[in-house]
Amino acid sequence: TYPASGTAYQGAWNVYPYYTSGKFIVSDIETGLYVFRFGDPIGISQNGTEIPDEYSLGQNYPNPFNPSTKINFSLPRAGETSINVYDASGRLVENISSGYRLAGNYTVDFSASGLSSGVYFYSLSAEGFNETKKMVLIK
């Protein structure tokens, strides 16, 4: 957090990342207090500002797909979430997204360019909610 070289202290003194707004506070001993906001990982976007009433995991589209598809999901509360893809035998193939998310409606892009044709399952886990859906990759 230091702005120039030659300072005696080079790093954060304190970090507070627990605001539901998605912002977090960082302070250092020499230059003060900073307010940051977590950015969205590439391929995940929040749709509007509406807060849904319940958790949901949408059917991917298009389905069947080649090589990429979109997955919609909704979170009524902020919290830790993960979206995973599994093959037909139940083996984890890829973690598309994991981490803290604010309440809202989201779309994630999934590219299966490194996978072979077949049936796959994707699952949303968030704060006690779990749902799984099937998707088909055709190359």
Image (cartoon, rainbow, N blue to C red):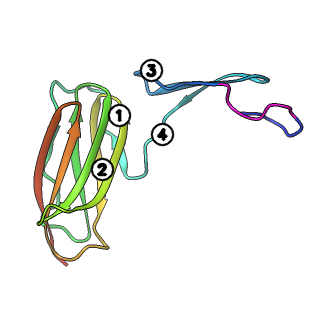
Whether residue 48 is visible, yes or no, is no
Tag 4: amino acid? Gly
Residue annotated with mark 3:
19
Label 2 crowding class (10 Å Cα cut-off): few <14, some 14-19, many 20+? Answer: many
Q: For the residue labelled by badge 3, is the local secondary structure a helix, a strand or a loop? A: loop
Q: Nearer the viewer, mark 4 or mark 1?
A: 1
**Rendered location of residue 138, percent (x, y):** 16, 75
Q: Indicate whether residue 83 is drawn in magenta.
A: no
Q: Indicate whether residue 10 is drawn in magenta.
A: yes
Q: Find out whether the residues at labels 4 and 2 contact each other: C-beta distance under 8 Å.
A: no
Relative to 90, 75 lies left or right: right
Residue annotated with mark 1:
101
Residue annotated with mark 2:
108
**70 vs 133, nearest the viewer:** 133
Residue at x 19% of width, y 62% of height? 91
Residue annotated with mark 4:
39
Tell me which numbered mark, 3 or 1, is placed earlier along the sequence.
Answer: 3
| Mark 4–mark 2 distance (CA, rounded to whole Å) | 14 Å
Tell me which numbered mark, 4 or 2, is placed earlier along the sequence.
Answer: 4
